[in-house]
Image (cartoon, rainbow, N blue to C red):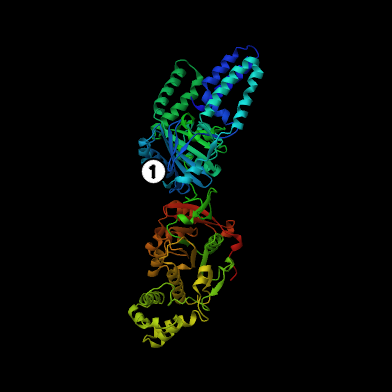
């Protein structure tokens, strides 16, 4: 008998006893029997009058154990690799069925999906006793399976202890619990003292045993009391629509799943009973039961898995019958008889394959990107990325630079220092100092780190060869061979322009020397503190622009490479297509992993960009836009049809309420998002 059915019987019996007390005093015996029979349920309900209770739990470094109920739990932080919003109906259903089938849940094993705001957890539980050999086997298999559908991180130590956060049940609350039933002696007179004493002894005994504690964490107020989904013939479209509606409505919930080896036999037995009652006994009231169990049998025959499930949440959901109950949180820790019969399509409605981000720790630096298509917050944990690099891709007019400014402003507010390569003068409203590179530039021949002179000359020669499309690298190396003898690049390149035998190279050396840093040099300290480097004055010369961008990147590389530290600075390069095809760019991106400097590449196109460069960028944001632009990028980013359809509906930000439609790609995780653009950072008038 399920828990809520017991409660209803108990309440009904109590009402009958109270009414009968007006007629006969011997009804007191029935009340005593009621208290004794339902002693566990009565204790749980009584103690939860004042507090949400939980069993006494023993917390170890990597697991939690309930010695009374012999339940062991372990927790994982989880982030879905697949996203409900980018899966078709059939792919979504097949994915869930596949996962549940591979988990191979037994009747004493539980998998619980817990969502608290944007934080997701998976709890693995099993009825077992030390040394927990069966649980270890179940846990190992479950994690191997879940890793194909979620990014997971085991919770340990203080993180696990803070999750439980239990405290002893206060004596003052116990006194109140014992005082409330004193209404029984008022109804029954002196004889009423006997059932009250029986109740008091049972509750005090449970209290003294330490079985119950006050639950200060993972608190839910509602518990499912009837699985109405199982009464319906859910199509794939139904499940998909219900899942989107649920995740758009409920922000905090827990779904407990377990195996159900008895459901098939139960369905056949109950269907036979209902059929016999309808035909033989001609009882029309058996018809709904007949339809119900026929539906269950048909769904099992179609391939759905038999399960037991319970939904706990903090608010009601239209399609699930939930009851507000103080015992809801207790049901999370001791599922047992709280579980209802269910099928895999029912579970699919609640399994969290939607937005959010996995945090490495509570002090992780998280930046808000926007929301997904059902309004869930989408964030990125910078400290969980393998490198602080980002690619922002989008066509003209779709909010690419506005999105970049919004993200950079949030990074600055977070305490990171930002260096911006600004070709069009669009980043002046970030509050950073602005330096025109024609007035002051980095002295790229004198890098900050102790790099051998020949290596510096080779890097500069390669940049000149690529930017100005000069194939004879040996000739450039010959001209630049003696540059290390001069104090700065202006003096060195002026001498090289006079000495070279190539008229073309003489022009190149002269334009670099005369166009960059006419009044001096930018110091490393200025770069570290954050600055906008305006390329607007040299933009009419695309070759010089490409060369200058490369030298700024190389100079910052010399400042940060090889120094393992937490992300502290970000180099944002707008119109990055100037240098993304450079052979040196991949070296810079790979060499700056975990160096303290992240690179944000902002570009319109990926044409001629090496795939190896894209693979080294852990965070990609692709803006929506015209079909031709999306088709051009599909092969680079391996977009599927759902992602194509999402992006092609993108409009200019002013038509979408200061939002931009985009696809967020973080490793295997892909999110369809709406980027929230800061209205204070709208495009500036040039």
> Which quadrant of the figure has residue 198?
top right
Q: Residues within 10 Å of mark 1 (few under 14, many from 20)?
A: some
Residue 585 visible in this rendered orientation of the protein: yes
Q: Is residue 287 above or below residue 120?
A: above
Q: In the image, is 184 to the left or to the right of 479?
A: right
Q: In the image, is 54 to the left or to the right of 593?
A: right
> Which quadrant of the figure has residue 184?
top right
Residue at position x 55%, y 42% from top?
Answer: 249
Q: Is residue 679 above or below residue 213?
A: below
Residue sitting nearer the eye, 563 or 428: 563
Residue 608 visible in this rendered orientation of the protein: no
Q: Is residue 196 above or below residue 609?
A: above
Residue sitting nearer the eye, 122 or 59: 59
Residue sitting nearer the eye, 238 or 15: 15
Q: Which residue is mark 1?
A: 143
Measuring from the top left, give residue 642's x and y in whole percent.
45, 51
Q: Secondary structure at mark 1?
A: helix
Which quadrant holds the C terminus? bottom right
Q: Is residue 56 above or below residue 361?
A: above
Residue sitting nearer the eye, 453 or 572: 453
- Most extreme residue toward the left, as rendered? 474
Measuring from the top left, give residue 467's x and y in whole percent.
41, 75
Measuring from the top left, give residue 426's x and y in whole percent.
55, 68
Residue at position x 57%, y 38% from top?
Answer: 315
- Most extreme residue toward the bottom, as rendered? 498
Measuring from the top left, give residue 449's x and y in whole percent.
42, 72
Q: How many marks?
A: 1
């Amino acid at each position: 008998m399920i828990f809520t059915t017991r409660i209803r019987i108990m309440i009904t019996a109590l009402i009958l006893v109270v009414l009968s007390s007006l007629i006969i005093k011997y009804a007191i015996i029935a009340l005593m029997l009621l208290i004794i029979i339902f002693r566990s349920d009565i204790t749980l309900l009584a103690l939860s009058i004042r507090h949400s209770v939980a069993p006494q739990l023993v917390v170890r470094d990597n697991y939690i154990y309930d010695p009374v109920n012999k339940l062991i739990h372990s927790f994982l932080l989880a982030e879905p690799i697949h996203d409900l919003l980018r899966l078709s109906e059939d792919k979504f259903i097949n994915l869930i069925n596949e996962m549940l089938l591979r988990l191979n849940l037994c009747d004493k094993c539980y998998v619980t999906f817990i969502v608290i705001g944007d934080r997701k957890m998976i709890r693995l539980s099993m009825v077992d006793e030390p040394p927990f050999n069966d649980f270890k086997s179940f846990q190992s298999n479950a994690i191997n399976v879940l890793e194909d559908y979620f990014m997971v991180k085991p919770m340990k130590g203080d993180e696990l202890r803070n999750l439980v956060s239990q405290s002893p049940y206060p004596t003052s609350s116990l006194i109140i619990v014992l005082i409330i039933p004193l209404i029984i002696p008022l109804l029954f007179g002196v004889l009423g003292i006997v059932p009250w004493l029986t109740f008091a002894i049972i509750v005090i005994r449970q209290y003294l045993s330490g079985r119950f504690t006050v639950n200060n964490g993972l608190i839910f107020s509602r518990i499912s009391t009837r699985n109405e989904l199982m009464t319906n013939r859910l199509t794939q479209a139904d499940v998909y629509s219900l899942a989107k509606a649920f995740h758009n409505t409920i922000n905090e919930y827990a779904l407990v799943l377990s195996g159900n080896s008895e459901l098939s036999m139960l369905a056949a037995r109950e269907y036979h009973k209902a059929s016999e009652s309808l035909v033989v006994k001609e009882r029309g009231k058996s018809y709904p039961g007949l339809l119900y169990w026929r539906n269950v049998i048909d769904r099992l025959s179609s391939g759905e898995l038999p399960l037991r499930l319970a939904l706990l949440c903090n608010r009601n959901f239209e399609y699930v019958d939930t009851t507000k109950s103080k015992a809801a949180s207790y049901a999370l820790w001791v599922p047992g008889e709280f579980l209802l019969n269910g099928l895999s399509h029912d579970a699919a409605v609640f399994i969290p394959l939607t937005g959010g981000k996995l945090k490495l720790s509570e002090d992780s630096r998280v930046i808000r990107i926007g929301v997904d298509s059902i309004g869930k917050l989408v964030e990125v944990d910078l400290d969980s990325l393998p490198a602080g690099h980002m690619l922002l891709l989008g066509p003209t007019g779709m909010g690419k630079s506005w999105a970049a400014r919004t993200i950079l402003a949030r990074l600055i507010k977070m305490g990171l220092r930002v260096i911006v390569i600004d070709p069009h003068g669009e980043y002046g409203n970030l509050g950073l100092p602005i330096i025109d590179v024609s007035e002051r530039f980095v002295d790229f021949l004198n890098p900050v780190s102790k790099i051998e002179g020949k290596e510096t000359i080779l890097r500069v020669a390669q940049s000149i060869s690529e930017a100005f499309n000069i194939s004879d690298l040996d000739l450039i190396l010959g001209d630049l061979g003696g540059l290390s003898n001069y104090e700065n690049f202006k003096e060195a390149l002026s001498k090289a322009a006079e000495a070279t035998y190539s008229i073309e190279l003489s022009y190149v050396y002269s334009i670099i020397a005369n166009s960059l840093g006419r009044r001096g040099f930018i110091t490393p300290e200025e770069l570290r503190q954050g600055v906008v480097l305006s390329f607007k004055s040299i933009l009419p010369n695309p070759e010089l622009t490409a060369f200058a961008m490369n030298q700024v990147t190389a100079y910052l590389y010399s400042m940060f490479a090889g120094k393992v530290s937490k992300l502290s600075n970000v180099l944002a390069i707008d119109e990055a297509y100037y240098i993304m095809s450079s052979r040196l760019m991949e070296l810079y991106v790979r060499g700056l992993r975990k160096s303290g400097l992240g690179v944000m590449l902002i570009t319109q196109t990926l044409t001629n960009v090496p795939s190896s460069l894209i693979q080294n960028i852990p965070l990609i944001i692709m803006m929506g836009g015209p079909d031709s632009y999306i088709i051009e990028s599909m092969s680079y980013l391996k977009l599927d049809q759902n992602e194509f359809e999402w992006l092609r509906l993108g409009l200019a930000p002013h038509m979408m309420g200061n939002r931009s439609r985009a696809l967020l790609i973080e490793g295997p995780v892909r999110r369809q998002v709406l980027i929230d653009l800061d209205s204070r950072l709208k495009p500036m008038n040039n």
